[in-house]
Image (tube, rainbow, N blue to C red):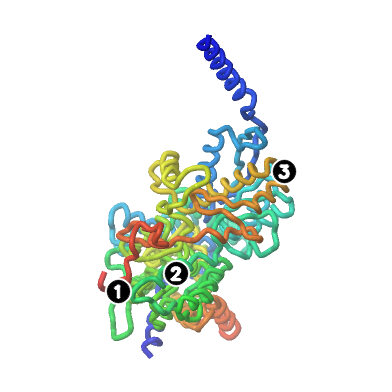
Amino acid sequence: MADFVQLVVLGLLAGGVYVAVGIGFGLVWGVLNIVNLAHGALVIIGGYITWQLFSAFHIDPFLSLPVDAVALFVLGYTLQRGVINRIIRAPLLFTFLLTFGLNLVIINVLLLMFGSDFRSVTPSYSGQGLELGNVVVPYTRLASLGVAILTAAALAFVLNRTRIGLAINAISADRDAAQLVGIDLRHAYAMTYGLGAACAGVAGGLIAMIQAITPTAGEPYTLQAFVVVILGGLGRVSATVVGGLAFGLVEAFGQSIPGSGSVFANAIAFGLMVLVLVTRPQGLMGRLR
Amino acid sequence: MTVRKLALLAVAVVAAFACGTASSGPTTGSTITLGAPLGLTGSLTKESILTQQGYNLWQDWINARGGILVGGVKHPVVIKYYDDTSSANQSAVLMQKLITEDKAQFLLGPYGSAATATDAAIAEQNQIPMVEANGAAQSIFNQGYKYTFGVLSPANKYLQGVIDMAATLNPKPTTVFMLSADDNFSLEVANAIVTYAPTKGMTVFPVKKYKNGATNLSAEVQAAKAANADIVLNSGHLQEAIAINKAAKEQKLNAKIFAYSVGPSTPDFIAALGKDADYVYDGSQWTPQVKYTPAFYLTVAQYVAAYKAKYPGLGDPDYHVAESTAACLALQRAIENAGSLDAKKVRDALAALDVTVFFGQIKFDTRGINIYKPMVVEQIQSGVHHTVFPSNIADAQPMYPTPNWDQR
């Protein structure tokens, strides 16, 4: 029983990271209709900023998360405004090619700057945790889950309660109508991508604490974000939160299958994704559009 | 009279000696071209650069001596490199280019088992010997290839030293939990432990496999915790070793021995984990503390000094550098023994080679892999690598048992 509870706890905590990675990806996909293959690379930039601030200035990794968010927002805004906007109405394949290219460029710039060494942020409290009987709740992972939920809440607030958020929602509903009522499309697109990148930056900061990062470490996260968003459903931040936590739980239980269960953890997650697509194409919590 | 005779004799001797050295001394022959594709960009940059350093150290040394001596003629050496961008397929393409366009006479291996496997096929097709130092998966050598030789200990030896060491410790650990990534190399390491540990009186739990490159290993660590084994082994890569060590601390997984096949020997492991890296063991191909008596080239101490002189500020050479130099030495000695630059003759000389250098004994089994050199066991103690096994070459005692996480 304690083992079961422990797995649930670990699954939910791991899910926190997937939530953080998924929300930005889901926003860009839902609004701009871009499957952003550079998302994992943006995540890792956030990780490197946190690592750099920690190793050079001893800044606590949680305190550097806002820096990650702002830096990635600026980068994301610039990328969309300067590059991606040019092909926004082109067929889907072009956005794939462009974001894949961006992914390669970012990875190689990071390789030039930081080399391929493995970096990880290990603050003094790393590894400590709350012990409830036989169940351990690691503090950093708990705090990461908290940060992920807060980031999701903040994003939901921006999207639903601010002028730019409403503009983004309007574009998501109908691009041409939004333009007709005077929304500056290029600015709103760039804001959307910027917000998505900012969420990726926060996720990267969290990931740097949990694992070791290299410039190429972001690639699995692009894939995981894809699954998380489909599981939860496009078009709502809360749906991505549910998708992320569900993915974390599925992974934890998949990995705990005795023997070679872990090898199939991804297969199980993707199988679940297919099942959701077949039975509930809008996702567990998504809205059909 | 006798004095004059003696003087004449002396002059004659000196003259004969001078003429002798001038006439029978080696002349300089054609330059030997060696080829090596390396991942100078991409995900294997770090290890590939270490490999290149090892090759270059030997190249400088041999050329300072005029080159490789073949039948009284010294042939200088040039190593031609290409960047395979850390891709095994690209590595094979470049290997072929090295052979056909650059006329490489002999080949040195790329970095990693994946690229070595694809390159070995090219070496075989072209019947050009490849001596490699960075592909330890036995699957490379089980293809029946005749032209690929690996100077390093094969994968199945990687963690056996840890089991041998554990068997000498008191209280003796009796249970082993084995985690493994699902790539060829890692599974070979793990499966070897499953068959080897019982011969030392230890029980092994079923191997817990995980996806190669997995980022979240908390469920695996939880399984290890539930097993409550004395020894926790991981056969994977640096990134997974770091993730497991972090999760072990978070989830309070305690064991008497933590040993990981690959990872702890690199400086990155200590840099990433700080104090949490202490007490971790790993199997290493070579350490700067080993004591071998070399038949030629440098002693271990001279090698370390030569590395530090050429690459100042990088600390001691790690085993990737040493094994790469050893590959060059094996090739050099084989060419000398063959007395020829003919690929077939050098291949036969490699197959018959048996020589000890600073890296250890180099001798190949019929498949072409060096099963004769033992692995050594290292432990991180207060942030520094120490060789702790075998005891005759160790520079420190194992710190055993590993204290529980809350008592560190």
Q: Which element type, helix, strand or loop, lies under badge 2?
A: helix
Classify 10 Å Cα crowding around label 1: few (below 14), some (14-19), many (20 and above): few
Q: Is residue B160 left or right of residue B364?
A: left
Residue A37 sits in quarter: bottom right
| Residue A59 located left or right of residue A177 | left
Q: Nearer the viewer, residue B85 or B118?
A: B118
Give amino acid for label 1: Asn
Among the two numbered marks 1 and 3 on one chain, the one whose residue lies closer to the N terminus: 3
Compute the Cα span from label 2 to label 3: 42 Å
Mark-to-mark CA distance, 2 and 1:
23 Å
The disc numbered 2 marks a residue on which chain? B
Q: Quadrant of residue A60?
A: bottom left
Nearest to the observer: residue B257 or residue B9: B9
Q: Which residue is mark 1?
A: B404
Identify the element where label 1 is drawn.
loop
Q: Which residue lies under the disc numbered 2? A: B164
**What amino acid is found at the position of numbered circle 3 in the picture?**
Asp
Residue that mark 3 sits on: B342
What is the x, y in percent for residue A4? 40, 87
Which of the chains bears the disc numbered 3? Answer: B
Q: Earlier in the sequence, mark 2 or mark 1?
A: 2
- Measuring 52% from the left and 76% from the top, which residue is drawn there? B194
Quarter of the image where the C terminus of chain A is located = bottom right
Residue B18 rendering spot, x and y as whole percentages: 58, 20
Establish whether labels 2 and 1 are both on one chain.
yes
Say which of marks 2 and 3 sits in front.
2
Q: Residue furthest left?
A: B407
Point out the residue furthest to the front here. Answer: B1
Q: Label 2 amino acid?
A: Asp
Labels 2 and 3 positioned on one and the same chain: yes
Q: Residues within 10 Å of mark 2 (few under 14, many from 20)?
A: some
Sequence-earlier tag: 2 or 3: 2
